[in-house]
Structure formats: C-alpha cells, structure tokens
C-alpha cells in the first residue's frame, strides 16, 4: 500500500490541475470526495434508529464536497440538512440533487437569529464543517466568524467532521482562527495538507481520515512530494508476515545492549518491547551485576553478562558483545547506559574506534587479549538510543562508524547534543532538521516528540500523527527503541521499521491513556502492555 502524501496548498492545487487535464475532472473529484466523506460518517456514526446530519456549507469546493456527502447520507436513510453559510451559485446542481433525495436546504441569510440552525443542532448526530477550505484568509471576519464563534460558545455540539480541514485553519502554516470549531474527525482528500500536522492546527483536526480520489500516480506534480503521514493502512501493510510454518529463527534475533545500576528498568522495557513486536529471540547484554534482579522478570530472554565497573558497562565488554553476535539480526545500543567514561570507551571499541588491546577480565567474561576488530566491527543493523546517542556524539565522524542506515532515535535534547543546535532551533524546524541531518549522516533519524518525524537519507520523511502527554514519561523511549529493533530483527527495512515502530508506539500510548482514564497516569510499562492490542486492531482480529 502506498503511503499518504503530505503536501502544501500550492502542491495540491497543481496536482488537481494536472489530474483535471488528464481526465479526472474537478467535478469527478468532488463526487469522489463527497462520497468518501459520507462513507466515513456512515462507518463511524451509523447506529440503529433514525440518524440526523447537518452540514455547514460554504461557497467553495468544501461546500460542494459537503453537499455531495449529505446527498449520499440521505440516500442511505439519514435525515439531512444543508445550512448555507455562504451563497451557492444560482441553480447549483448539487443543491438540487440534495433536495431531490429529501434533503432540507437552510440559509443563514434567512435565519438571522440562528433559530433553525439551533433546532437542527439539537437533533443532529453529526455536524459537517464544510465552510472554508485551503483558500481561507485569516483572521475570519463578518457574519461567518460571528456564526462560528456562537457555535463554539454553544453548550454542546454534535461530533464535528471537518471536510478536508476545519474552517479557519491555514493549511500551510498551521495557524488557527480563534473561532475555529475543533473536529472529532478531519476527512482529507487524497493527501494531507502540511498545516494540519503543525501546531496549533493539529489540536483541532481530531483523527485524520484520508479519502482517495483516484488520481493518476504518475502525475508530474507528484514528483518531489516525498513527505508522508503514517496511518493505519500503510503501517498494516508493513507488518512482517507470520507464516504458520515459521520457527523462532524466521523472526530473527534482537540483541539489546542496555542497562546500568541506575537504569535497570530500561533493560526490561526495551527487551520486552522487542519481543512484543514479534522478534523470535531477544538476547540481552547487560552489566553482569544486574542479571539477578532482571532474569526472573523476563524469562523468555537469553543473557550475555558483560564486564561492569560499579554497575555500568565496562570498556572491556566490547569483545564480549562482538563474540555474542552470532545469528543476531539487529542490535540495540544505549538504553539505560549512563554516560560514564568506561561506557564511552566500550562504545568506541565496539565501533572499531579504539586501538587499545582488551585485557582479560578477572571474572573471565572476555576472550584472551587481542585487538578489537582489525578494522571496523561487523555489526548487524543497529538502533542507537538514549545515552548511546550522547556517547556517540563524542566520537569524531561517528556516523561513518555505524552500519549503513542505522536508526537513531533522539529526543530534542539528544538531537541537540548530536547536532550542536539548540533545542529551541530544533523544535522550531523539526522536519527540516531531521531531514538535513539524516542526509548528512546517512542514517534514519527518528526525532521524537509531539508529531514525531522519521527521516531517511534519500529525503523521504514521515510524520507520526500523534501528540499525547501519555508518551511524555520516563521509559517511553526505551519501549520505542525496543519496538524498532524488534522489527529490524525481523528484517523489516530500516525506514519501515522506524515508521512502524513509532506509529505502534504512539497508538499504544493513546490506548493506555484511554484505558487508565488520564494521560497523567500512564507509565512506560502501560504503553508496552498495549502493544498487543494495537497489533490486534491492525490485523482486524476479534
């Protein structure tokens, strides 16, 4: 399945113009858009008994899409009304088609006190917002702004479904007028406008649904549009297969190098996440002193006990890890490490950046003395997270020491350490920063935070459409890193593994908040425990 593109307003206009010239006319696009909106409403809000839908209709294409949607709903048994907030063309065929199937036409110009509007709102099960689209100029003024402000102040409204975008949102910048109605669902046509994935607009769009318009995919205007939004259908198509005749080797081995005396939980969270996402075997390499505390909590894992110094990974552990990579198909570095000098030296040796000779450890964990890697270590695909990133930044040209297309999962603070930019600079230009450094380093960058950005060196980038305080919790990143390495272990390509892992992580956070009743109560372990439910929902199993 192809990913849903994210475009600017100008790009979408060029795409539609070229499609119209190729035979997918504007009228046909409107019919497909309206039918798609109606199908979303039918699927989400249809229940037994008579249903009522009211549409706020503007004078442009969004208003036309809304009239088509109401016509389909009327044909499917809904009682529908179209409230013309702005005048439509005289003898508009879309208005006539709606009237022909029993739809009621109301006009703001004939309802100055909004009495008829409120009568319909008292009965409606859904309210379609189809007043303004991408051509809106802010701030809104006049009677439309007054009307929207009055609706926003109303004690209650039915669920709002925005047609392509909530009225009063700038679809390029993400700016929002103060009278904009927050939507429960925004139904986008073919692609998502970039402004909807920026703040403050994202707080008004609710859930995103995308309606295909059947546009040719070889349009010249599509070329160069390499920004996408991660959504359920695309992510479902990237899940690795689970053949019935499989054995554990089919699903690969993830090796998780994690933990220190101060951060034992990072081991459990990341390793269990790798298992929950489907890795066949998880091999955990940790400071040997931590093993007794963790072994009973993760009996499915196998263990590699590393030399440690005061509870942190020791420099001499590099040889142990390298000698334990047999059959490992993906490697996670960093969760819970701490930033002690001996662990920094461990990472340097692991990546072949140290010319020192390892010495036999008194506990006998390492092989006889020899130089670590005459050259670079042969490492499987890697994920680097947390303290691993901070230590990585200490190595000159560190990006050249990692396996090609490794996955880096920094939050803005770690991205600041890696790039030398301030957190404020990074947060102000998240997409551009992730893309720039992914290309510079040659690795996949997962810039975590609200609306996580996943960028690849070839310029492709994905936005994860989740912003929820449930994910702002210590250990949440360990879960994400474990999900990504578990997918890499199953031989999912790095970009797909990063996108799919981040999307599952976000959905698990949303489910955890819903189950517990409040985002403040969600712990990282709660996010982890919702991963099976996300996979169940993705597969459609009951």
Image (spheres, rainbow, N blue to C red):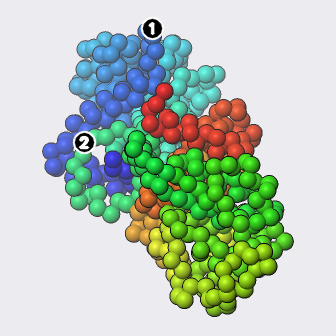
Between 59 and 237, which is closer to the camera in this rendering? 237
Q: Is residue 365 visible?
A: yes
Residue 69: image location, x then y, percent: 34, 26
Label 1 secondary element: loop
Crowd band around label 2 with a 10 angstrom C-alpha radius: few (<14), some (14–19), many (20+)? few
Residue at position x 35%, y 20% from top?
73
* Residue in the picture at 64% in, 41% down: 529
| Disc number for residue 49 | 1
**Residue at the top extreme of this rendering:** 49
User: Does residue 340 appear in the picture of this structure?
Assistant: no
On screen, 237 above or below 33?
below
Front-most of residues 420 and 337: 337
Viewed as shown, does residue 289 lie left or right of 430?
right
Write the residue at 35% across / 55% down. Answer: 10
User: Is 501 on the left or on the right of 133, as rendered?
Assistant: right
Which residue is label 2 attached to? 214
User: Which circle's residue, 1 or 2, is located before the other in the chain?
Assistant: 1
Q: Is residue 537 above or below residue 69?
A: below
> Residue 29: image x %, image y %?
25, 39
**Residue 397 place in picture, x, y as percent:** 56, 84
Q: Residue at x 52, y 73 (%)?
A: 379
| Among the 4 quarters of the image, the one containing residue 91 | top left
Q: CA distance from mark 1 to mark 2?
A: 33 Å
Query: On screen, 363 above or below 138?
Result: below
């Amino acid at each position: 399945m192809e990913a849903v593109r994210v475009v600017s307003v100008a790009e979408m206009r060029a795409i539609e113009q070229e499609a119209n010239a190729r035979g997918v006319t504007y009228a046909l696009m409107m019919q497909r858009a309206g039918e798609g909106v109606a199908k979303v409403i039918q699927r989400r809000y249809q229940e037994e008994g008579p249903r009522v839908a009211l549409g706020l209709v503007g004078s442009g294409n969004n208003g036309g899409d809304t009239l088509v949607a109401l016509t389909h709903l009327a044909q499917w048994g809904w009682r529908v009304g179209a409230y013309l907030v702005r005048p439509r063309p005289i003898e508009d065929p879309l208005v006539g088609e709606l009237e022909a199937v029993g739809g009621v036409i109301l006009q703001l110009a004939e309802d100055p006190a909004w009495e008829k509007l409120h009568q319909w709102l008292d009965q409606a099960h859904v309210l379609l917002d189809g007043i303004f689209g991408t051509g809106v100029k802010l701030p809104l003024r006049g009677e439309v702004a007054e009307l929207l402000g009055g609706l926003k102040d109303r004690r209650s409204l039915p669920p709002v479904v925005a047609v392509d975008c909530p009225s009063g949102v700038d679809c390029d910048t993400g700016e929002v007028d103060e009278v904009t109605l927050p939507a429960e669902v925004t139904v986008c046509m073919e692609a998502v406008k970039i402004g909807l994935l920026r703040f403050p607009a994202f707080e008004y769009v609710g859930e995103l649904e995308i309606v295909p318009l059947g546009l040719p995919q070889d349009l010249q205007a599509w070329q160069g549009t390499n920004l996408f939004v991660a959504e359920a259908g695309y992510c479902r198509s990237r899940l690795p297969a689970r053949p019935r005749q499989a054995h554990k080797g089919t699903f690969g081995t993830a090796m998780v190098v994690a933990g220190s005396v101060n951060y034992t939980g990072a081991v459990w969270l990341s390793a269990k996440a790798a298992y929950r996402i489907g890795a066949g075997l998880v091999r955990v390499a940790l400071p040997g002193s931590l093993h007794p505390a963790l072994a009973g909590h993760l009996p499915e894992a196998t263990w590699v006990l590393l030399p440690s110094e005061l509870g942190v990974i020791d420099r001499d552990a590099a040889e142990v890890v390298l000698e334990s990579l047999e059959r490992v198909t993906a490697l996670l570095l960093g969760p819970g490490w701490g930033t002690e000098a001996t662990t920094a030296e461990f990472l340097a040796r692991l990546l072949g950046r140290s010319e020192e000779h390892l010495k036999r450890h008194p506990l006998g964990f390492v092989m006889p003395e020899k130089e670590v890697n005459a050259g670079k270590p042969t490492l499987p695909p890697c994920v680097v997270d947390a303290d691993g990133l901070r230590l990585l930044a200490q190595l000159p040209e560190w990006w050249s020491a990692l396996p090609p297309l490794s996955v880096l999962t920094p939050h803005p603070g770690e991205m600041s350490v890696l790039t030398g930019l301030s957190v404020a600079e990074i947060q102000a230009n998240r997409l551009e920063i992730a893309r720039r450094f992914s290309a510079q380093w040659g690795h996949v960058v997962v810039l975590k935070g609200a609306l996580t950005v996943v960028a690849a060196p070839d310029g492709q980038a994905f936005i994860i459409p989740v912003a929820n305080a449930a994910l702002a919790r210590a250990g949440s990143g360990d879960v994400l890193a474990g999900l990504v390495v578990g997918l890499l272990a199953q031989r999912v390509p790095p970009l797909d593994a990063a996108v799919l892992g981040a999307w599952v992580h976000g959905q698990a956070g949303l489910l955890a908040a819903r189950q517990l009743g409040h985002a403040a109560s969600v712990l990282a372990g709660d996010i982890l425990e919702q991963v099976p439910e996300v996979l169940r929902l993705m597969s459609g199993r009951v």
